[in-house]
Amino acid sequence: MNIKNNRVALVGIGAMGTALAQTLLENEIEIHVWNRSPEKIETLAQKGAITYTQPHKAIESCDIVIVCLSDYDAWKEIVDYENVRSSLKNSILIQLSTGSMAEVEANSLIMKDLDVELIEGSILCFPEQIGTELASIILAGKSDVIGSCDSILRLMSPKISYLGESLSAPVVLGNAIMSSVLGFSAGLINGAALCLKGDVPLESFKEQTVHNFARMQTEPLRILDAIANQDTENTQASVSTWYDAHLKLLKISDKLGVDTKFHQGLNLMFKETINQDLGSHDISAMVKVFSNKN
């Protein structure tokens, strides 16, 4: 697919949208910007962005439109603006807003009616990392359409992960990553609460956390490989072993007065895994319980 110009329209200038815009400007890309709150684009205007008071004006002269909003409700309102749909016709829309699978599917039908080439994506990094080697953007859509935008995309994130043509794939992967990050972060905070209640210096907890990082760089990969290979029988610590350790964690939490709501759900998952005769298997076998919601 041929791109007629390198002008990029950007809709949505929150923290992430601003980071995207600044990165493109620093790389001498002409950007056309609209945001619901005009004051948020003043700084970008001073740096060379062309700003508008109406969204369709920012979109109509650009082949590539990047949307980065907090949710799809905001995007739905914008699409319903007068002249926006006609200005989107025959463009490439890179949708980086946060949405559900149902919202992604509904949006794809609207874009199909408008002859818009749709790229769905998620940003898996912080705003300050955009444009650096730490940036990570995952995308789905037609490979030739994504290829035609490659030079623009890699300015924002040198690392681009292509997930195929299933437009809901970035939503699924984004939430899978969120699950792992939140699980680790909540567990870390829970551990800090245990230390505080048990009069253990947080500095000692930090020291052991750093020490465990070396192991945790390989353990997640081992677990994912076991799941991918459907080999959950080889283990150094079985589900039953982990379950016994987790029971002790619950007991000491109760004794110290640390809330156990975070761990109660995990305890139920351990029980269900054991009930399915997987107690002697590796902890990776728990994927069978997570995957079989009744």
Image (cartoon, grey):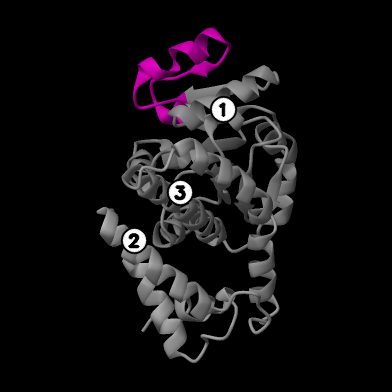
Query: Is residue 57 something one can see in this rendering?
Result: yes
Q: Within the image, what quadrant is residue 54 found in?
A: top left
Q: Categorize mark 1 by other alpha carbons within 10 Å: few (<14), some (14-19), many (20+).
A: few
Amino acid carrying label 1: it is: Glu
> x and y percent of residue 153 in the render?
68, 38
Query: Bounds of the magenta span?
Result: 34-57
Q: Nearer the viewer, mark 3 or mark 2?
A: 2
Q: Residue visible at 32% across and 58% down? A: 253
Q: Within the image, what quadrant is residue 23 found in?
A: top right
Secondary structure beneath label 1: helix
Q: Nearer the N terminus, badge 2 or badge 1? A: 1
The residue to which callout 2 is attached is 252
Q: Nearer the N terminus, badge 3 or badge 2? A: 3
Q: Residue visible at 56% across and 86% down? A: 280
Is 140 in the magenta? no
The residue to which callout 3 is attached is 188
> x and y percent of residue 99 in the render?
42, 52
Q: Nearer the viewer, mark 1 or mark 3?
A: 3
In this picture, residue 213 sits left or right of residue 205: right
Is 44 in the magenta? yes
> What whole-number distance in Å separates the C-alpha atoms at marks 1 and 3?
24 Å
The residue to which callout 1 is attached is 128
Secondary structure beneath label 2: helix
Query: Is residue 260 something one can see in this rendering?
Result: no
Q: Categorize mark 3 by other alpha carbons within 10 Å: few (<14), some (14-19), many (20+).
A: some
Q: Nearer the viewer, mark 2 or mark 1?
A: 2
Amino acid carrying label 2: it is: Ile
> x and y percent of residue 102 in the render?
40, 62
Q: Nearer the N terminus, badge 1 or badge 3? A: 1
> What whole-number distance in Å separates the C-alpha atoms at marks 2 and 1?
39 Å
